[in-house]
Image (cartoon, rainbow, N blue to C red):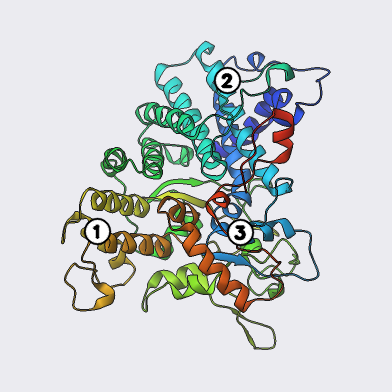
Amino acid sequence: MKNYTKYIIAGVLLISLSVSGCKKSFLDQTPEASLPGVNFYKTETDIKQAVSGAYSSISDMGRVNYWLFGEMRSDNTTFQYNPADRGSEQREFMDQFLIGATAEPLQGYWQQNYTGILRCNEILARIGDVPMSAGMKNQYTGEALFLRSFHYFNLVRQFGGVPLRLTPSQSPADSRSKGRASIEEIYTQISADLNTAGTALPVKYTSTEAGRATQGAAFALLAKIYMTQKKFSDALTALRKVQQLGYNLMPVYKDIFLPANKNNSESVFEIQYLGSQPGLSSDFLYQFAPWSSGSIITGDPATSLNGSSGWNIPTQDMINAYETGDLRKDASLAEGFTDLSGKFVSIPYVKKYNHGIIDRGRTNDNFPVIRYADVLLMIAECLNEQGFAAGGEQFTLLNQIRTRAGLPAKTAANPIAALSVDNQQAFRDAILQERRVELAFENHRWYDLVRSGKAVEVMTAHGLYEIAHRTNIPSGSYLLNANKLLLPIPQREVNLDNLTQNPQ
């Protein structure tokens, strides 16, 4: 991974120079000077640096916006209200479904995804003219297609149809889009890209290159796209390909997330961070610790907690979702902390990414995007959608996940009501529940609620609980309807690119 990180640093510098003149944020000004990207891409090393630089867009987004726009929109997490520091109120509005089109986080999320897309487009446009082996050209092309698909999948699930940009802009004059593509057009493009990437990418890399996109990552992401479209047969075909690539569940759940076990046998794709390098490290430990916990949770007395902390706080409903004896609960969250006076403070926090610091303000935890447990649960879901089968493979896969968690099997004729799953809808509910606790705080819950059609129902009930049990809830919070399942398009993009706004 050290060599990979070296290329990320160089790649960020290279790619930022090559695309800065055509970023959307520069639509309203004409660059006085520019260096066309074609001038940079002369050797295989240049392409490798550019591809590694494209990964940095995911790393940047993973530090905040990835979980803010995913996990924080669900009933899994909320925030600790900070009366003294109101600088991050727009993050609170995201949780409360009050976010407006002019909110800075909205613009930031849009920009991060399109920056990643533009970087990938630049690579795809230039790689054909650079001399290198066919194998390496296929790999780098596959990586760029995977990363572009990842960004478009983020955008289409949050905003619906968005501008479909597939080539780099050469000047401000051609930077304007043709308007919003349809949701179907976006899914058609990224499905095609991932099918191509899945055949072009390696199955695995050497240890120094671990963390790059693989065949498994491409086909697993493709399956998620098909499942979002309710194309369960196509999803199952993609998932069976992943199943044949040698992934395995880690024996102990909590060990999956240890920095020493990065890119382990269960990891299909994860966002890479390197705690030893300033600018490349993660800091989830600080952000997810209650701001009132001082250094008790972080173990870093030199870093003060403020408005940047107290985020992604587990909800009471999330805490209650775990069955008695579920080993995943203690690995994933704590229900509070003991302060310096010895008093227990019942403000929960995420433990899954809490493995100590490398240096002040820096941690070494990666963020999982797709794990093999996710793949197995998706296969079980697809099989059930093809038809309920008591004792079928879908039960075997579901119970494989439960067994590792220390839980008893669920069966079709179980005398214990809580363990009885005797029809297709009951199995759907069992899978949704298992995904919630297995993949907690990994950014899946919101998207699972939306694609299952349960988002409005579940989040309305969640909102009623929050309003009844918390203070400082603004008027109009948690008033959900089908329109609010999509975010408003950032107003700046609506104005600059003449885009149609989503109804709210």
Q: Is residue 481 above or below residue 40?
A: below
Q: Residue at x 18, y 78 (%)?
A: 415
Amino acid found under the numbered disc labelled 1: Gln
Check disc 1 and report the residue beneath it. 424
For residue 188, which quarter of the picture? top left
- Measured from the top left, where is residue 80 in percent x and y? 67, 70
Residue corresponding to mark 2 = 167
Contact (Cβ within 8 Å) of mark 1 with mark 3 = no
Judge the density around disc 2: few (<14), some (14-19), many (≥20) Cα neighbours within 10 Å: some
The answer to which quarter of the image holds residue 465 is: bottom right
User: Residue 243 vs residue 38: left or right?
Assistant: left
Q: Amino acid at mark 2?
A: Thr
Q: Element at badge 2?
A: loop
In 3D space, how far apart are the residues under numbered discs 1 and 3 (Cα atoms)?
38 Å
- In space, the residues marked 2 and 1 are separated at their CA atoms by 44 Å
| In this picture, residue 133 sits left or right of residue 380 | right
What residue is shown with label 3?
Answer: 284
Residue type beneath disc 3: Phe
Direction right: furthest residue: 32
Task: Mark 3: give few (<14), some (14-19) or many (20+) Cα within 10 Å.
Answer: many
Residue at the image position 74 percent from the left and 20 percent from the top = 172
Residue shown at the point (81%, 20%) measured from the top left: 30
Q: Is residue 30 above or below residue 377?
A: above
Q: Are marks 2 and 1 in contact (CB under 8 Å)?
A: no
Q: Closer to the camera: disc 1 or disc 3?
A: 1
